[in-house]
Image (cartoon, rainbow, N blue to C red):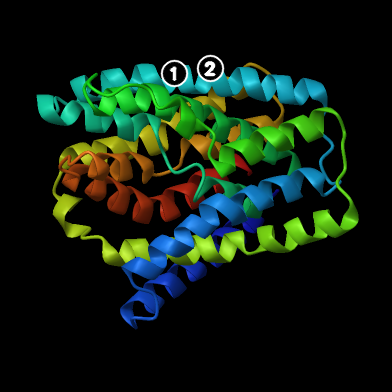
């Protein structure tokens, strides 16, 4: 895919995000509606798009590609866990804030933003890497993430790993491995549901941006350090490393896109449930999400030149 196509697709995404901002400003979508629609996107539309992509017949990846995706996905998250430990020390974060910066490093928005963006700007085969990263994310958050956020007080939540998105992602990989195709009536229905993902997720992203108080975190230099290190330097480093190791273009672009995602919502949602102060996480989500529209566009355009 050329840099021109990436620019065009990211331009479309920017317009959809702007629609969400407008809908919120005009009180068409409020916090309650946004929360309910987000559940529909995460539990129904996103999973449907994953399965529809696998069932489309346009994927030419092999079993070897899936194995490569699993190995690289595991290596990617092992690296993020290590970086998550080092980053708060590097930026000299306050002791009470270190676990939040750690979570921000590891748990980015690869589901709500990553899946539709990858679907919009990358070739069909890229969905394998996106699915694998989402499965790794779920496995890690409800084990490592829960324990980290609670300071070791809360136990791993194995049952929550099996969310609709994770189950559908695993099912999609199984169907791909065994080359199983669903009946047309079922495949077409799933396709129609999945087609709503990009519009709904990007519009809701705009709503969330409009709701958050971005200016609170703008003066925090550590958030900007996060953006530079996690969202810019890490994808660039991965681009050169993966190319040097001889991986194909789709592999490189897929993982670099996943590395360029902004802070995810799940750590903040979990922190709110346990009564934690979520101001830092909220600021990180808001600022990194707004900036990501520019950084993802620039990086992916450069990578595809």
Q: Which residue occupies the extreme front position in the image? A: 159
| Residue 236 seen in the figure | no
| Residue 127 seen in the figure | yes
Residue 141's tag is none
Which residue is at a point 50% across and 26% down the rendered structure image?
139
Q: Would you say 58 lies left or right of 27 here?
A: right
Res. 206 image quadrant:
bottom left
Percent of width and height locating residue 230: 37, 33
Query: Above or below — where is 211 with respect to 247?
Result: below
Q: Which residue is mark 1?
A: 79
Query: Above or below — where is 8 with respect to 61?
Result: below
Question: Dot 1: what SS?
Answer: helix
Which residue is at a point 16% across and 31% down the rendered structure image?
97
How much space separates mark 2 and mark 1, taking CA atoms?
6 Å
Q: Are marks 2 and 1 in contact (CB under 8 Å)?
A: yes
Q: Would you say 54 lies left or right of 95 here?
A: right
Question: Dot 2: what SS?
Answer: helix
Which residue is at a point 63% across and 64% down the rendered structure image?
196
Res. 19 image quadrant:
bottom left
Which residue is at a point 37% across and 22% down the rendered structure image?
156
Q: Nearer the viewer, residue 25 or 91?
A: 25
Query: Above or below — where is 110 with respect to 67?
Result: below
Crowd class of label 1 (few under 14; some 14 to 19; many from 20; radius 10 Å): few
Specify the quadrant that holds the C terminus. top right
Q: Would you say 75 lies left or right of 283 here?
A: right
Percent of width and height locating residue 226: 29, 36
Crowd class of label 2 (few under 14; some 14 to 19; many from 20; radius 10 Å): few
Percent of width and height locating residue 270: 31, 40
Q: Which residue is mark 2?
A: 75
């Amino acid at each position: 895919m050329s840099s021109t196509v990436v620019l065009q697709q990211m331009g479309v995404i920017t317009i959809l995000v702007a629609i969400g901002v407008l809908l919120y400003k005009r009180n068409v979508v409020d916090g309650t509606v946004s929360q309910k629609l987000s559940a529909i996107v995460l539990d129904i539309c996103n999973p449907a798009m994953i399965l529809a992509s696998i069932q489309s017949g346009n994927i030419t990846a092999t079993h070897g590609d899936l194995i490569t995706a699993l190995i690289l996905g595991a290596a990617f998250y092992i690296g993020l866990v290590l970086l998550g430990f080092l980053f708060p020390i590097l930026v000299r974060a306050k002791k009470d804030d270190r676990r939040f910066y750690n979570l921000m490093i590891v748990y980015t928005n690869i589901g709500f933003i990553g899946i539709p963006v990858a679907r919009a700007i990358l070739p069909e085969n890229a969905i394998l890497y996106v699915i694998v990263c989402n499965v790794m994310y779920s496995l890690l958050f409800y084990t490592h993430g829960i324990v980290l956020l609670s300071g070791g007080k809360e136990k791993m939540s194995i049952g929550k790993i099996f969310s609709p998105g994770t189950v559908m992602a695993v099912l999609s990989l199984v169907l791909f491995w065994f080359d199983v195709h669903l009946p047309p009536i079922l495949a077409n229905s799933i396709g129609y549901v999945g087609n709503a993902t990009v519009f709904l997720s990007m519009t809701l992203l705009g709503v969330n941006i409009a709701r958050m108080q971005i200016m609170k975190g703008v003066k925090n230099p550590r958030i900007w350090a996060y953006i530079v290190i996690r969202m810019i330097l890490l994808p660039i480093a991965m681009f050169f490393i993966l190319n040097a190791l001889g991986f194909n273009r789709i592999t490189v672009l897929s993982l670099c896109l996943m590395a360029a995602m902004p802070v995810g919502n799940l750590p903040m949602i979990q922190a709110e449930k346990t009564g934690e102060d979520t101001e830092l996480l909220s600021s990180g989500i808001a600022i990194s999400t707004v900036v990501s529209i520019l950084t993802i566009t620039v990086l992916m355009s450069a990578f595809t030149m």
